[in-house]
Amino acid sequence: MRYEDEYKRKTGRSAKLFAESSRMHINGVSHNIRYYRPYPFVVRSSSGSHITDVDENCYTDYWAGHWSLILGHNPPQVAKALHEQIDRGWMYGAVNEQTIALSKMIADSVPAAEKIRYTASGTEAAMYATRVARSYTGRDIIVKVDGGWHGYASDLLKSVNWPFEGSESTGLVGDDRIVSVPYNNLDDTARILDQYSERLAGVIIEPVLGGAGCIPADDDYLSGVQELVHKNGSLFMLDEIVTGFRFGYGCLYSEIGLEPDIVTLGKIIGGGMPIGALCGKEDVMACADATKRERSYVGGGTFSANPASMVAGSATLAYLKKNQEIYKRIDNMGRCARDGLADALGGTAVVTGLGSMFMTHFTMGDCRSVEITDAVQAARCDQEKLYRYHLKMITQNDIFVLPGKLGAISAAHADADIDRLVVAAEEFRRDEERAK
Ligand SMILES: Cc1ncc(COP(=O)(O)O)c(C=O)c1O
């Protein structure tokens, strides 16, 4: 394929280094989604809206550290906080004032965060969420949605990828206790919840389906599920690891008027450093009280609440709080990206997303009246074409969206970046037409 040949010519040093990486690491990577064909470029440095590879190619970056970098790469206020913290020590393994400062900011803006427990990743926060739900209710079934991604925790590794039917992994036990429901389909969800009502511990949902296609949940869907779950005495859990502090200062659920029992956070609240947070209502989180004999054992881990992550998170949130016009600016760029890409690609693609997030779906056939509202519809789109589109952008336009994934705009991006993105999409459409 032409783009692959061009990509290889452009990334010779990456090819050599990735071969070396592959000798030591499974698939050459340290997170499955970081691999793409023919091989991922190898990064040397990053700054603002850019990421630079070992061949000195400088890309406008919409992957943005797994969408965690809302202020862009190494913004000065976060860098300053980290430099100062490094002088004071970066790992205490003990209660520290840096954690208290970050938690005050989260508690003030996330009403469900009456109690917080930090972890080193979103995966762990989601794992603890399911454990607390089971402990609190004394029931065993956790319901998630088709395509829902909550990290690699064993309790949630089911129905993540097409055909959204079974376990995502060998080596799991008890995955019959994870039940998946169709996203944005309240009738079918209600029917399945009813089937498991006596065993239902809780439901966990991303308010915008991220990895499975950047698809916002209908407000009615989320409030409908919340009502059913609460009527049943089960816990309503929102995974805001991507959406927390992404669309406004706080969580998306507050804007929609929901009242979750548990919220998981990560990514943005760590300012680009490792983090996860299990946040919940006081009475729910009380079951994790480690002084009780019967307790839900919610640990944290060696690196939980390390002062470096805490100050990077605090510096990020403090900056966002003071400069909330950032949200308006990046949301506007997001809207321009979605509209511009949809126009540029004509009737060949649907562009989904919300605020500063966007994702292109190449439907089979003309799609002017098609909507993408769940992971099944997204997965039925042309994944090979999506791969070509993203590889063309990397190769010919120096634009990096992780192939197959959504793009996230940061405060470091400029309107001109969005214009370039749209031009790249137009070129792609013309290339595809010529190739027919
Ligand atoms: C919605 C959601 N939940 C949980 C996770 C897992 O977080 P982490 O990768 O920090 O373990 C992710 C990661 O992308 C995510 O998108």
Image (tube, grey):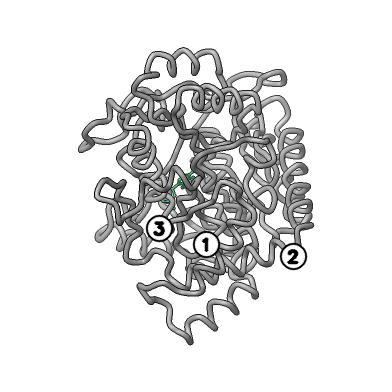
Q: Is residue 157 above or below residue 293?
A: above
Total label count?
Answer: 3
Is 66 left or right of 24, judged from the image as shown? Answer: right
Tell whether label 1 touches label 3 (CB within 8 Å): no
User: Circle 1 is placed at which residue position?
Assistant: 270
Q: Amino acid at mark 3?
A: Thr
* Residue kind at label 2, given as amino acid type: Lys
- Compared to residue 384, the image places residue 111 above or below, namely below
Q: Residue at x 44, y 62 (%)?
A: 274
Tell me the tag on residue 119. 3
- Give the labeled residue for mark 2: 322
Q: Residue at x 69, y 40 (%)?
A: 255
The residue lying at 54 percent from left, 62 percent from top is: 103
Three-letter amino acid code of the residue under disc 1: Gly
Mark 2, ligand 1, within 8 Å: the answer is: no
Query: The residue tagged with tag 1: helix, strand or loop?
Result: helix
